[in-house]
Amino acid sequence: MPGMSGSGAGGAADGAAGGGAGAPGGLRRTLTFRDLLVYGLLFIAPMAPVGIFGTLQARSHGAVTVVYLVATVAMACTASSYAHMVRVAPRAGSVYAYARAGLGEGAGFVAGWMAMLDYLLIPAVAYLFSGIALHALVPAVHAWVWTALAVVVTTLLNLAGVRTAARVGFAVLAMEIVVLAVFVVSAVVVLVAHGAQRGWAAPLTGEGGFSVGAVLSAVSVAVLSYLGFDAIASFAEEAGGGPDRVARALLTCLVVAGVLFAVQTYLAALLMPMSAADLAARPAEQGTAFYTTLDSAVGRWLHDLVAVSKAVGAAFAALAGQAAAGRLLFAMARDRRLPGAMSKVDAASGAPRRALLGAALVTLVAAVGAARRDDGLDQLSSIVNVGALTAFGLLHASVLGWFWIRGRQEERRLGRSGAPGDGTPSVLWHAVVPLLGLAVVIAVVVEASATAQLVGGVWLLAGLVVLAVQYGRRARAGGVRG
């Protein structure tokens, strides 16, 4: 059982056990609040709704902005659970470390194993998206070449160190924000000059009446736009200012993303030439609905500008994802759950070089392999979400486990009373919020495709087999820990 009795003790224990910030060969506390926010927003991408705008507009019967407002509130439950657990276990590895603290080593391994599926394949999807977009701009170069080039460039930046990657990432994020601002200004100008295609309240109330069921169905898809903000928690051992800064960056990232998503979808819904009913009847046009709106309302130039921004931004979203994957592999290797070679930190750059190279290799194979298939993007996209959602579910369970079971056991062991380091726990924050977050996760997994559920189930089964083998070896060595 982890020897933690609150955030302070947890940090000390973790640092001692794992070679924390000040230990030789440990990760360095060099990231500022801005750096953390950059990593989170890069991974999410400020214009993440572009690709699924049409789908959400059709599903919600036109109430697409409400979909993102509800999705932001729903994901706030997950952000709250991260904020709680990063104070309990301020370690690299994110949900792996939290489930290990709140539920035990076995659950921690399962959480890390499922998160690994997310952190290794979401960057592959982003790299592939970047390769496809750049191939459309420069058809003479095949998509798989662009994809491989994006992997190589961003991997080199990650190997140069977390601060170097954050600085370059900030420049790319600034570019994406500028492009989003150009869209917002252009949309406002068109709306002032020519008016909206539908009622000003339509993105909030829907077209032809508000449907709660339709909105909730769309929310199950929209929450996937937020996958990636949790990468911030992976840098807990590299953040100056400690776990409080990480928690604040998590919550800030979610709020900023929610506002950006709501604003752009509201404006796009007002300008879109097709009704939600027309989009629902033409599913083939849903994927390009945002770009169709740009073409008809503003001009082809903005279409191309957004496309270039998305192409470059996707590669750097993958940079943030690859960095998070490297920290997850590093943390699991440090705890002897993966090969120990990946627990080494480069003395010059302070980066977990071997873990990063391992993550990059898997991502490269997946991304380039998919780029060489006509259905590669669909195949990859269908399987990446279940790993993240399962990890989110275990995160919420970790809050319940730590604040209501394991933390209290630790307090009794130390002769204290109340919740670990927090005073008497609030029923709202330590029970209701995690349960709501767990309900959202379950609802989204149920809505996932059969392929995603199958792959997620097979990956989970493989992880359980690996866990059983590890426990068997420990049992034979007489070293099983609870």
Image (tube, rainbow, N blue to C red):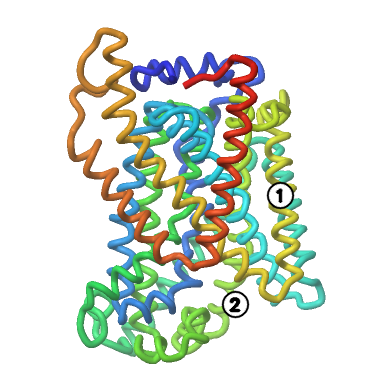
Q: How many marks?
A: 2
Please name whichever residue, 364 or 465, is drawn nearer the observer in this view of the structure: 465
Question: Which of pointers 1 and 2 indicates the residue nearer the eye?
Answer: 1
The structure residue drawn at horizontal position 59% and vertical position 77%, both measured from the top left corner, is 304
Which corner quadrant of the image does residue 420 belong to?
top left
Give left or right: position of 436 versus 456.
Answer: left
Q: What's under tag 2, amino acid-wise? A: Asp
Q: Position of residue 9 (x, y in %)?
A: 39, 15
The structure residue drawn at horizontal position 76% and vertical position 69%, both measured from the top left corner, is 372
Query: Mark 1, residues whose alpha carbon is within 10 Å: few (<14), some, or many (≥20)?
Result: few
Give left or right: position of 430 versus 136.
Answer: left
Quadrant in which the N terminus is drawn: top left
The structure residue drawn at horizontal position 50% and vertical position 47%, both measured from the top left corner, is 38
Q: What's under tag 1, amino acid-wise? A: Val
Label 1 residue SS: helix
Q: Which mark is residue 362?
A: 1
The residue indicated by pointer 2 is: 304
Q: Position of residue 283 (x, y in %)?
A: 47, 85
Which corner quadrant of the image does residue 218 belong to?
bottom left
Label 2 residue SS: helix
Q: CA distance from mark 1 to mark 2?
A: 31 Å
Up the image or down, 374 lies above or below 207; here it is: above
The structure residue drawn at horizontal position 70% and vertical position 70%, both measured from the top left corner, is 134
Up the image or down, 403 lies above or below 141; here it is: above
Residue sitting farthest toward the top: 415
Please tell me which of labels 1 and 2 falls first in the chain. 2
